[in-house]
Every structure is written in structure tokens, then in C-alpha cells.
Amino acid sequence: MEEAKLAHVLVVAFPSQGHVNPVLRLAKRLASKGLLVTFSSTEEAGLMMRKATDNKASTSIPIGKGKMRFEFFSDDHDLNDPNHTDLDALMERLEKNGPKAMADLIDRQAKEGRPVSCVITNPFLPWALDVATDAGIQAGLLWVQSCAVFTAYYHYCNDPTIKYPATLESEISVELPGMPVLAPADIPSFMLETNPYKSLTDVIVNQFKNIKKASWVLVESFMELERPIIEALEGKASLLPIGPLLKSLQDVESNTIRGDLWKSADCIEWLDSHEPGSVVYVSLGSVVVLDKEQLEEMAWGIKNSGRKFLWVVRPAPNENETGLPEWFLKETAERGMVVPWCPQDEVLLHPSVACFFTHCGWNSSMESLCSGVPVVGFPQWGDQVTNAKFLADVFGVGVRVKADRGSLASREEVERCISEVVGGPRAEEMKKMAMKWKEAAAEAVSVGGSSDRNIQAVVDDVKQKAA
Ligand code: UDX
């Protein structure tokens, strides 16, 4: 269909990998259902995406019954500034320059004959919701974390009757509707007074200030996974689960459009050369950087496990080295591969992968669940700790490394957890649960499944309002 005849949705992603991926996946899903979708983020994110992938991040690409295109906006910053990765500075720049840049972008679409009829944004960019509604355009949110984490933040921001612990040592546990009791170590760390990332606490609180302006709060989750939590929120916030969004990558066209911010190493051939269920995949996402001491303990634990491994190690911002000890690289070269980035979605679906040693970012958690891969959870901060609690104790797909936040996880503990998930007495049960979630996830996104129905309702609403 001609571009100008399709209802046009603008999706806006916060410029970090954990946000770009789910927003881009949503964009592809919406396009496949017959919408024109423009994916947008900062120019820096656009540059990184184009450099890292072969996607045609500047052209109009047909997907299913619709089309996708890209527009990046300037947040007016200097890439050569050594502080350009600083989160506080980024938030400030986005707030200062984002609203005008976004309003201009929306105006330009109308002038070029494809007026925007809906904006779907990331809650980390609350001003995008204001820009859309001020322009009289329907707007929605994509919550990129779990419904459990939404509940924890929602009550923290809106319900003074619930007392949250101030520190990890506190005796206070939190009981929230539809959730298991959360100990201080299970509560998103940005809510503790001891949290060192104060600006992130503000970002979390700001997400709820204008949330009522959103026509829908879409969530990267699925009903069968978090039903009691979603039901308990009814009347307070209406969440519309539409995930796992990764599962929408079923056709070749959309598979070629990727949101990686760094170039992936070739590791699939290496995985092909190994037996089914023999490799431990290790990755702590796009932001976590371990200190030298913890990295060394992890290296020992992985070496002593005796297992084959694929380990993604991100260098710290503005550094080139991974910080992995030389001895480790030498002694494990025969049975391991260390890479700076990989196509994680493909890796998790590879038959040789036995388990995922993960920091439990929500994307990694969902990708693991919908690939049927059990996990060793090694959360560091934020929502990761709550996700780890759910993966181990509620979804039943793994174990959590014992290390109080901020303290060291020993090499023995790292080794013990890998052995437990790969070959321990409960390994089979964890694999069975992971496969159960994989099937449930596939069902949720299949035609007529719970997530598919929800996304179809959004698409129908957008089309009707644009007609
Ligand atoms: C951040 C937060 O840390 C996380 O807790 C929050 O839920 C989202 O924002 P991040 O730490 O990057 O995200 O973790 P995660 O949510 O797991 O997202 C990482 C994404 O990068 C995943 O989609 C994963 O598939 C992808 N990835 C990671 C790769 O494609 N290749 C890699 O080598 C590593």
C-alpha cells in the first residue's frame, strides 16, 4: 500500500540498548500489522546502529502489510566530549532539546504528506508524551521492564501506606498486590536510600508523572507469565502485555533490521562446532561493568566449571580493554570464546547453549524465557534484582548467585551455580520449566494469542482514529 495511505505511528526510544531493542521490535510488530511506523531515537543512537548493522536505517522498508522508516533527532551534543556517556548529562540534554526536536520531527512528517496519528514512547522520555498530547496526537507508552517492577515502582510513587526498606540490612520486607514478598535484596535498588545512582531514582519517579496521558501502557511481558500482578493492578493502572516482542522476528525482512549499537562478533559458527547443550553463554548486558576483582572471580569460576563458554565482555565506557586477566584468555582459549558483542537472540536459540549466565536485565530475561534456556542470575542493580528473584523463585528457570549487592561473588559460588543449572539434581526441572515458558510465549504472540490480541486492538484503534 502507498505510504501516505497508511496510519502513521512514531515510536521513540531512549538511546540505550535495553530500550532500543524492545522499541524497535515493537515498531516491526506494528508495521507488520499494516501501519507505517517511524522509529526514532537520538542521532548518536542512529549513528551507532548504522555503523554496527547492515540495516538500512535510513530507508523505507516494507514489513508484512506495512512499512518502517527511521528518523533520528539531535540532542545537541558533542560526541568528542569525554563526558558524553554521562547519564545525568544525557538526561539533561534530552529534556532540554528533545521536546523541540520531536515537535519539529512531527511537523515535518505532516509537511511531507505522512501526518503522525500516534506516538508511542519509552517512559524514560516522559516529555515525548507531553509533546504528542500537546499536538493533539494520541499517545501510548511501552514499559520495557516487567509488570512486577512496574508494580514496585507504582506503589513507591503513589502509595504512601506501603513502607519500603531504606537499606539492604533493613528488616522490612514489602508485600505488594499479586506479588511474592520481596526482601530488601529483591526490591529494585533505585528505591533504597543507599542507591548511588540518585538521578535514576528521579527518572523512575518522573515516569509516573504524566502516565495518565497515555492511551495504553503496553508491556514487554505476556499475560500467562505475570497474570496475578496484572490483575492486581486493575483499577490503578491498566497494563497491556504484548510480548515477548522478540518473537515477532518471524520473517526474513524484519530479521535484517536490528538495533545493535555495537558490531556483533561471528560466533554462530563456533557454536555450531559444539555439542547440543554444552556451552554456557555469559553476558551482563550493555551497561554493567564489573570491577577488576569481580571479573577475576568470575573468570576463575568459569574456568573451574570445566564447561565450554561464550562470554560477552563489554569494555568500560571510553576504554578499549575488557579487563579480563591474561592467564584466563590463554588457559581457556581451547574451550571458550570471548567477544565484545554478539547476536544474543540467535545465540540463545542455538542448540549448543546449555544455560545463560545473566545480569537479568528484563530483555535478557524475556529472551531467555522465550528461548527455553535456564539461567544463572547474577543481578547488579535496578530492576535486575527483582527479575532475578522472579526467574529463580517464581518462573522456576534457574538459580541466583549468592552475593549481597555490592559484595563479591566468589569463584566457588560462580562455579557452583553453573554446575547446578547445567548438571545438578534440579537441572532437568529448570530446563522443563524454561521449555514450558518458551511454549507459552510462542502461544501468546501467535495469531489470536493473548499478546497478539492486545496488539491488534492497539493497531485497530490507531487505524480507526486515523481514518
Ligand atoms: C538496561 C538495564 O540494565 C536493564 O536492567 C533494564 O531492564 C533495561 O535497560 P541492559 O543492561 O542492557 O538494559 O540489559 P537487557 O535489558 O538485558 O538488554 C540488553 C539487550 O542487548 C538484550 O536485548 C540483548 O539481547 C542485547 N545483547 C546483549 C546483544 O544483542 N548482544 C550482546 O552481546 C549482549
Image (spheres, helix red, strand yellow):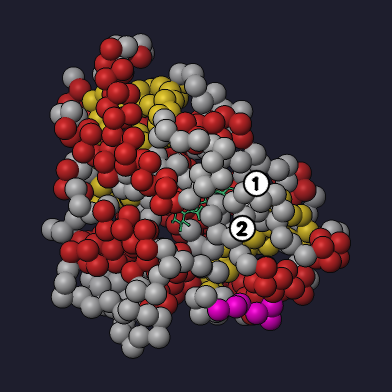
**In which quadrant will I find the C terminus?**
top left
Q: Is mark 2 within 8 Å of ligand 1?
A: yes
Residue in the picture at 77% in, 65% down: 325
Mark number displayed over residue 330: none
Using the rendered view, name the quadrant where residue 134 is placed. Answer: top left
Q: Residues in magenta?
A: 407-412
**Residue 30 horizontal/vertical position (percent):** 36, 32
Mark 2 / mark 1, whichever is N-terminal: 2
Describe residue 348's horizontal placement relative to residue 392 as left or right.
Answer: right
**Residue picked out by circle 1:** 342
Is 262 placed above or below 391 here?
Answer: above
Using the rendered view, name the quadrant where residue 412 is placed. Answer: bottom right
Is 264 placed above or below 349 here?
Answer: above
Q: Looking at the image, which is closer to me, 125 or 310?
A: 125
Tell whether label 1 touches label 2 (CB within 8 Å): yes
The amino acid beneath tag 2 is Ser
**In which quadrant will I find the N terminus?**
top left
Residue in the picture at 38% in, 55% down: 145
Mark number displayed over residue 283: 2
Specify whether residue 34 is in view: no
Residue farthest to the front, as pictured: 81
Residue in the picture at 72% in, 53% down: 321
